[in-house]
Image (tube, rainbow, N blue to C red):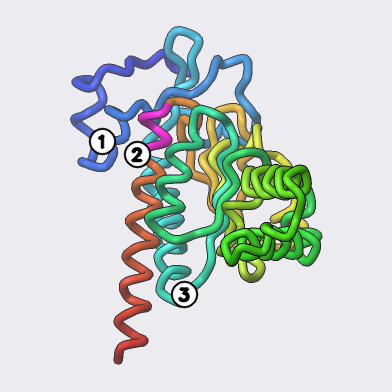
Amino acid sequence: MNDIATHNDEFMPMASKEVESMLKAGIHLGHAKSKNHPAMKPYIYGVRNTIAIIDLMKTEEKLRKALDFMREIGARGGLVLLAGTRPGVRRVVLDMAEKTCMPYFIERWIGGALTNYKMISKRVEHMELLEKEKESGGFDKYTKKERAKKEEEITRLRRFFDGLRKLTRMPDAVVVVDTTHDTTAVHEARRMKIPVIALCDSNANADLIDFPIPSNDHALPAVTYMLGKFTEAIQEGQRQHVEKKAE
């Protein structure tokens, strides 16, 4: 591969405003060349100081397709399940979930979330029943020890299932921030034939993803930029959905 510079002035002449913004966010910076996955070869522009440089022209193209898909899901009132369990990205994923009112995983992906959805939904239902019982004063009938035990159970359930309250059915798509970290999310979605939208760094297997977006997936500015775009697309679709219902 050619040794290329990553400086803005050398890349900007051929870049759109979108690509310029992605460059500033560090979306082009992949992993060390030695970690490159063969499936990412079409999306690697070159190498700079042993670091793979992602082709942002390809990123822009793939991002546009993914955003169109998410916008369409929002426009029909669909559900997108968000998966970002690596500690460094949890806050960004939660922010997107809150803004779009979508279900999410930020602690760890629970095995069977998609392949055994009925069992998972029962756990969520159990959590909500315990919460209602506590709020209505139902815990007053228990001993102090029993109350403490039930409150501990609520805390434990909230940690893992709090983000699934809005997962009232199987999702229309799954968004994965880091496919090499949340591999189970990708495998379960594929098994259930649910489209996967994901950031694919230079070490990812893009062949497993329906809507792969070549992008740095470990730097906070890059992830924040991409999830911000995802959020805008879903919200735009949701506004269209509201307008259609009003008509």
196 over 46 or under it: above or below: below
The front one of 77 and 131 is 131
Residue at 44% x, 17% y is 2
* Upstream in sequence: badge 3 or badge 2: 3
**Residue range corresponding to the magenta coloring:** 220-224
Give the residue at mark 2: 225
Where residue 13 sits, quadrant-wise, is top left
Give the residue at mark 3: 77
Q: Which mark is residue 21?
A: 1
Residue 172 horizontal/vertical position (percent)? 58, 66
Left/right placement of residue 92 relative to residue 180 reads left
Q: Is 62 a magenta residue? A: no
How far separated are the C-alphas under marks 2 and 1?
9 Å
Main SS, magenta residues: helix
How far separated are the C-alphas under marks 3 and 2?
24 Å
Residue 181 horizontal/vertical position (percent)? 65, 33
Q: Secondary structure at mark 2?
A: helix
50 over 231 or under it: above or below: above
The front one of 94 and 23 is 94
Asked whether the residues under the numbered discs 2 and 1 touch, taking CB atoms below 8 Å apart as contact, a structural biologist would say yes
Residue 179 horizontal/vertical position (percent)? 62, 38
Residue 108 horizontal/vertical position (percent)? 67, 39
Asked whether the residues under the numbered discs 3 and 1 touch, taking CB atoms below 8 Å apart as contact, a structural biologist would say no
How far separated are the C-alphas under marks 3 and 1?
30 Å
* Residue type, numbered disc 2: Tyr
